[in-house]
Image (cartoon, grey):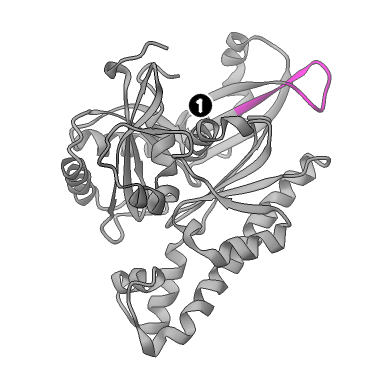
């Protein structure tokens, strides 16, 4: 890799609840954090991955960049949700070039969309663990209209999207950097955002299973609003413990727990599907990120239900701080929130 500013990208994670940015420098001394920033999105700006209020999002993007004095215009973004399909498939062993030629035909068997409506990509993982003479391929398909929508959004904010990644891959990128000493471990990376949960299971540094679940922290806010009659903004404050709503306080913990129980059930179901394919495997640790990672009840219930150690993912674990004025307390507080943007921020202009 050629070191230098011209290859640097700003990691830009546009979630349904929050926009997050990370600016990271890669040089001879390794990775250095320059800046991170977060800004809450307008209510209903993005719903289930669909852009509903593009003009307001553009204003928010520009505001966030100005607030943190970020001059770099080249960015990496990511997408996820039900318009993105990731499958690990077994095919006859062949060269990367040869598979690229037959990929559309192979993809038609696994992708529930018209092939003409998606962008396809793949990564050869290695020899198949199931069939001699076969290889395992990670196949990725994303709806073109979704990609085009996010690209247009970013361009309208005056930015140049050089890389469009998948949320779960960005999560894997930062895990591999932050936990390079534990690369051989068998782990599940789970990011719980406002509108969806991304799951990526790694074994020996290789992604074996990915899934996006249509559930997230927004469910808690919706339930608080329904039961208390408060606004969406007040519900968010109550969830985070910033608002002392005494008449309602007695039910708040139960509301949070009821939603988290549902998350744990869906995560456990996804793990069961994984174990049904890889019957001899056992996950050693679960690393959480996203807004849901702040909820201690999630750690407790998920550990009980899965019998797996649950920890928060720390994207700053092996990173030096270039800006000496960075508030380390703030960084640790927001660590789980910026994992995807950090994973995007270590991408480079010339990456595949």
Front in this rendered view, residue 143 or 123: 123
Magenta stretch encompasses residue 203 = no
177 to the left or right of 319? right
Q: Residue lying farthest bottom?
A: 247
Circle 1: element type: strand
Q: Can residue 73 be seen in this view?
A: yes
Q: Is residue 143 visible?
A: no
Residue 337 place in picture, x, y as percent: 41, 50
Give me the residue at 77% from left, 44% from top: 282
Magenta stretch encompasses residue 132 = yes
Quadrant housing residue 280: top right
Mark 1 highlights which residue? 120
Quadrant housing residue 230: bottom left
Give me the residue at 56% from left, 35% from top: 179
Q: Is residue 115 above or below residue 281?
A: above
**Residue bounds of the magenta highlight:** 127-138
Give me the residue at 38% from left, 90% from top: 247
Residue 117 place in picture, x, y as percent: 45, 33
Give me the residue at 47% from left, 86% from top: 250
6 to the left or right of 165? left
Q: Residue lying farthest front?
A: 324
What is the crowding at mark 1: few (fewer than 14 residues within 10 Å), some, or many (at least 20)? some
Image quadrant holding the C terminus, namely: top left
Q: Is residue 131 above or below residue 84?
A: above
Q: Is residue 325 above or below residue 220?
A: above
Residue 294 place in picture, x, y as percent: 47, 60
Front in this rendered view, residue 318 or 128: 318
Residue 351 place in picture, x, y as percent: 42, 19
210 to the left or right of 90? left
Image quadrant holding the N terminus, namely: top left
162 to the left or right of 211? left
């Amino acid at each position: 890799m050629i070191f230098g500013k011209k290859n640097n990208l700003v990691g830009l994670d546009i979630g349904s609840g929050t926009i997050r940015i990370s600016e990271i420098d890669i040089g001879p001394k390794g990775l250095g954090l320059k800046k991170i920033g977060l800004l809450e999105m307008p209510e209903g700006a993005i719903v289930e991955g669909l852009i509903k209020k593009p003009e307001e999002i553009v204003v928010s993007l520009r505001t966030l960049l100005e607030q943190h004095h970020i001059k770099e215009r080249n960015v990496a973004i990511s997408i996820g949700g039900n318009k993105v399909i990731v499958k690990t498939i077994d095919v006859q062993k062949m060269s990367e070039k040869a598979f690229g030629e037959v990929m559309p035909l192979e993809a038609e068997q696994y992708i529930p969309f018209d092939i003409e409506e998606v962008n396809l990509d793949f990564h050869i993982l290695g020899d198949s663990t199931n069939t001699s003479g076969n290889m395992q391929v990670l196949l990725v398909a994303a709806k073109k209209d979704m990609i085009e929508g996010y690209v247009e959004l970013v361009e309208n904010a005056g930015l140049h999207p050089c890389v469009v990644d998948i949320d779960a891959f960005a999560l894997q990128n930062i895990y591999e950097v932050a936990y390079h000493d534990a690369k051989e471990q068998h782990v599940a990376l789970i990011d719980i955002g406002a509108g969806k949960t991304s799951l990526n299971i790694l074994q020996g540094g290789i992604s074996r299973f990915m899934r996006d679940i249509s559930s997230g922290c927004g469910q808690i806010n919706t339930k608080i609003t329904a039961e208390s009659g408060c606004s969406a903004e007040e519900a968010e404050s109550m969830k985070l413990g910033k608002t002392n709503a005494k008449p309602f306080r007695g039910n708040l913990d139960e509301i949070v727990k009821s939603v988290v129980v549902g998350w744990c059930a869906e995560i456990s179901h996804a793990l069961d599907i994984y174990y049904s394919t890889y019957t001899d495997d056992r996950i050693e640790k679960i690393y959480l990120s996203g807004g849901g990672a702040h909820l201690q009840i999630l750690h407790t219930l998920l550990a009980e239900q899965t019998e797996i150690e649950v920890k928060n993912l720390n994207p700053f674990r092996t990173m030096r701080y270039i800006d000496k004025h960075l508030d380390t307390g703030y960084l640790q507080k927001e660590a789980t929130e910026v994992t995807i943007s950090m994973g995007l921020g270590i991408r480079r202009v010339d990456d595949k």
